[in-house]
Amino acid sequence: MSAERGGGGEGDGSLERLRRDGRIVIVGASLAGLRAAETLREQGFTGSLTLIGDEPEPPYDRPPLSKQVLLGTVDADRTTLPRRRAIGARWRLGTAATGLDLAARRVRLAGGEEVPYDRLLIATGVRARPWPHPAEADLDGVFTLRTGRDAARLRRRLAAGPRRVLVIGGGFMGSEIASACRELGLPVTVVERGPAPLVGALGGVIGQVAAELQRAHGVDLRCSVMVTGLEGDAAGRLRRAHLSDGTALEVDLAVVALGAVRNTEWLAGSGLGAGPRGVACDAGCRAFDVRGLVTDDVFVAGDVARTPHPLFGYQFLSLEHWGNAVAQAEVAAHNMVSPGPDRRPHLWIPAFWSAQFGVNIKSVGVPTMGEELLIAQGSLAERSFTGVYGYQGRVIAAVTFDQTNWLDFYRRQIETAAPFPPVCRTVDRRPDGLRPVPADFPDPSLPTHGPTVTLSGYSPTDRRIVFTPARG
Amino acid sequence: MRLVVDLNRCQGYAQCAFLAPDVFTLHGHEALRYTPYADDSRREQVARAVAACPVGAILLDDLPENLPDDVAGDGAGGPADGLHAAGPGVG
């Protein structure tokens, strides 16, 4: 019944009808969903707008949850996002979407209700990856941190003064949590299975700086070690963690910071190209179906999207970045109500920040593509520097520790595929920066634990099985 | 008043921390911390900080806390009237 409304061709006035009284449904009511809704209205969309979100709270900002909220300077329910404008929407908060019928253009909600759409935006984001052992994850004292409620619960426990906090995973989230714990004066142990914190995002050279930063602030940092088990007492309270080096740790609070899982389960069987790696879409944010064909009425934005970027070899990038959620939502919303020739590609240069242990860490580009690293300004030892990543002779990314004013320059270098190592001489170049060094990212084809088997080769006669033993 | 700072854009100029020190503070050399909800008594201070940010990174709105922009029932559409966002848009 809705297939004729606002879809398909653009020369027949259907787009005008869509813009005037079409039905747009946004699934996911966080940063990307909200900014998309505002952009749709800004673009002159006057039809009906529905925002569906599984959390009961109106859209809120997540970055403060691992910082100000854990420190107790901001309440978890006071990070509601400011609005750019009123959006005149129907809000379906506290209601998860559970299915999608592409042919009938309907979103199914928990409870069975169906919401019809002419254009759909998928912005369901990610959730915290849970501790893999369900019984251990259920122990009192085991937390993850993604939502406002998670942050409120964790804050209460931190305020109660745990004997020791165990942070499982030394990525950005784990490092920020450890930083907050130290600022609160709490003993904290970080267990990271890689050789250093932040190594997956920024490589081994910068990871070493992060490791020293943590230790200088009193973190008991244990790298190349995994947590193998969490043990509770008779009352189901966490009391001990077992580590892969054979040691055990007495802890009453553990935060699992093992990254995120994309919220795509509700799309299973829908025919969209969605799975554990996200929802694939073209540079104009239109979702691909499982055949690899692009849809014209389903769009994707934010953490859940995977989108090709011309500057980075047309790789499909998944960016769990605040700035990407905003920029991609704006492009998706614009394209949802614009004719083909007016549509725009999402060409945002990846950028993120993290504040931890008093240091402002910021990055542009895609550091993980970096083969080499040059410390162009400042010094690693002073923890105030600009690192530039090179890939096949061009600048591909940069990271700053307390040198944010340099980032814009390197963003333009990335945009213009400037040569690496940078040819221009810079002020404050130190011995660190005389020549590039390997950026030292872990080989993604090598598992960090446990033996594994992989298949390679294209044709059946060419298939090879490779056994990779556990790394020491 | 609800506010958010685009910390990709923030360069640590510290104008906001100077003009509205109860809401914005620098932690270390350039890491900005702020209160995402500012009391009405800080309205003028915060508005000055928004205006003085050299990179326009602060988004502030003074829409009512419980937005009356919910639309009941199907078919209704269009933004509710009488509401506006203050401050420069981010992005």
Image (tube, rainbow, N blue to C red):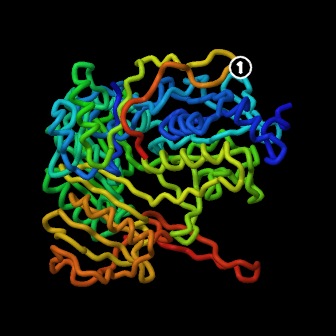
The image quadrant that residue A246 belongs to is bottom left
User: Where B91 falls versus A74 (above or below)?
Assistant: below
Instruction: Tell me the residue at 42%/34% (across/down).
Output: A147
The image quadrant that residue A316 belongs to is bottom right
- Residue type at mark 1 is Asp
User: Where A95 falls versus A118 (above or below)?
Assistant: above
Q: Decide which of A365, B40 is in the foreground and name it.
A: B40
Asked whether residue B79 is in view, the answer is yes
Instruction: Tell me the residue at 45%/60% (across/down).
Output: A349
Label 1: which secondary element: loop
Q: Decide which of B21, A376 is in the foreground and name it.
A: B21
Location of mark 1 (residue): B74
Asked whether residue A142 is in view, the answer is no
Q: Decide which of A89, A92 is in the foreground and name it.
A: A89
Q: Where is the C terminus of chain A found, in terms of image quarters?
A: bottom left
**Disc count in the image?**
1
Q: Position of residue A283 (x, y in %)?
A: 61, 58
Left or right of A114: which side holds A91? Answer: left
Q: Decide which of A469, B89 is in the foreground and name it.
A: B89
User: Where A436 falls versus A331 (above or below)?
Assistant: below
Q: Position of residue A137 (x, y in %)?
A: 43, 37
Label 1: how many residues lie within 10 Å, few (<14), some (14-19) or many (20+)?
few
Q: Position of residue A209 (x, y in %)?
A: 22, 64
